[in-house]
Image (cartoon, helix red, strand yellow):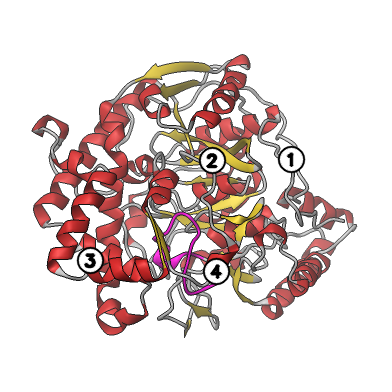
Amino acid sequence: MRLTGLSLTAARRLAETPAGALILRKKVFADYGIDRLLELPPTSRAPLDVHPGPREQTRRRGWRGADLDVPQPSSARSTAAQLRKAYLDGTTSPVEVLAEIRRRVDRGDFGNATFSPFYHLDFDRAEEAAKASADRYSKGQPLGPLDGIPVPIKDQHLMEGLPISGGSACLNEMAAEDAHAIEVLRAAGALLYAKTHTTEWGMNPCGACGHMSLPRNVYSANHGAGGSSTGAGVAVGLGLAPVGTGSDGGGSIRIPAAMNGVFGIKPTYVRIGRSGDIYGSSSVSTVGPLGASTEDLVDLLSISATVDDPNDPTRRWAPAQRDLDKRWRRALGRGVEGAKIGIPSAEWDDLDAPLQQPSLDALKQLEADGAQLVEIDEPLLGHAPAVGVLSIGLETLANVADLFDQAGEHFSDELRMMLALLDTVDAGEFLAAQRTRAALKIATRDLLDDVDLIALPTTQTTAFDYPLALDGIGIADDEAVRTMTRFNFLANITALPAGSVPVGLHGGLPFGLQFIGGAWDEASVLAVMAHAERQGWTALEAPRSCTSLLR
């Protein structure tokens, strides 16, 4: 059900009363399957697992593979590899590329997206970085794959001297320092020219917000761009950057990637350090990239995941894997011959009918090149969305509690209603959900001992209807939230890597296909994503106002 304006305010007020909260709780628990989750028998729960990291598989990951060329992108968007080649050839420079981005932003022509994907701009500092990068390229001494590459940053990470809001109306503080992820990117020579919009506290996966003008879908001005990494998906989708940072606690990278026809990957939990993230600690969320190609994802991952974060103790859970950059780049040419891809049919039955055949056809193309499609079945998978909602919801409730006490009137009606309903969940219910989460980790581990990857749709439907007339108006749409996150929470609550690739258009709107890998096995996810790109079915018609930075 969709609520806007006065009807949303009325529902929020009802939720903030004890009796009203219980009435709305009953409906929400039924809609999200939380009631069914809590009614599961003891056999569907495992002992409480206080470690939020993934369960390790018992066999060696991956398949033998090939040694193919890196897939060549086939869209209007410039990739980081193309920019690097042009810098080395001298046909353009980081300074000229950044100037081209600035001209486009100053013109304000964002095509169907209508509104800017950027919350705040930092071109002056980026221009200094571009000059230094151009000098290094002129000497043939670039720092690495991100040197001179424009990389916008999701507005949940501190950037020294810039305001940060996290999509909220009650924060606009100036950051005194850079987050860990930002320090690493600056040191790599990346051009951090902007902060991208996110939905309020990252809690809306559709790309909607009542107190700021969020960009719309790059393919349709009257549809959402997905969230919560909304601006990152739009910036990459418009070709304003080959890669941008996002974060993913329930699909917040994969959803906007799918909705805007680009690539995105959520790495294994705590693969990348998270200090300087105002969203706070979470057992489900991790930093990751959205990009114009699979190789763009590797460019950012290979920098961000290989530098330790001394201020994020959970980062120590990541294994000391050597040569991650080489491993991930080799994966781009591995192909899929010999890969076993699990298809959980019961999950696929929930995909909207018009999206099913194109998605299955894409998997058949992988099969034609040597992948083995394997039917798998695990009834607990259907409870992942309910476990995910309670996990990310209650952790967010805890993280914003102090701010809400101080400035709750500045929270949107949508978020206030959500927090009021989450406040009705008692400790026993939360812990029961976490015990089912522990059982899901074991069950998924066991599945991935038999297959290399699990294939799922990225979202249940295409982008949700979000007319421009609703700009500046509060909106809550629980059905849209469920359809966006239906297949995404599994990877978050099991802490596993998952990547989304574009698979087609329906009604002019993109949709995606995702692959979930085993613990710490981003390489296999990247390998199948790259091969999908190599086969060509990920290349969608470019949206309006999407042009190359190398014109």
The dot on residue 73 is 1
Around disc 2, counting alpha carbons within 10 Å, would you say few (fewer than 14), some (14 to 19), or many (20 or more)? many
Name the one closer to the observer, 38 or 253: 38
Query: Which residues lie in the magenta part?
Result: 198-213
The C terminus sits in image quarter: bottom right
Helix, strand or loop for the magenta stretch, by majority: loop
Whether residue 455 appears in this view of the structure is yes
Give the SS element for disc 2. Answer: strand
Give the SS element for disc 4. Answer: loop
Residue denoted by label 2? 500
Residue denoted by label 4? 471
- Left or right position of 129 against 301: right
The dot on residue 15 is 3
Name the one closer to the observer, 242 or 456: 456
Which amino acid type is marked by label 1? Pro
Mark toward the start of the polypeptide (3 vs 1): 3
Q: Residue at x 74, y 48 (%)?
A: 81
| Cα–Cα span, label 3 and label 1 | 49 Å
Which amino acid type is marked by label 2? Ser
Mark toward the start of the polypeptide (1 vs 4): 1
| Cα–Cα span, label 2 and label 3 | 35 Å
Tell us which disc is closer to us: 3 or 1.
3
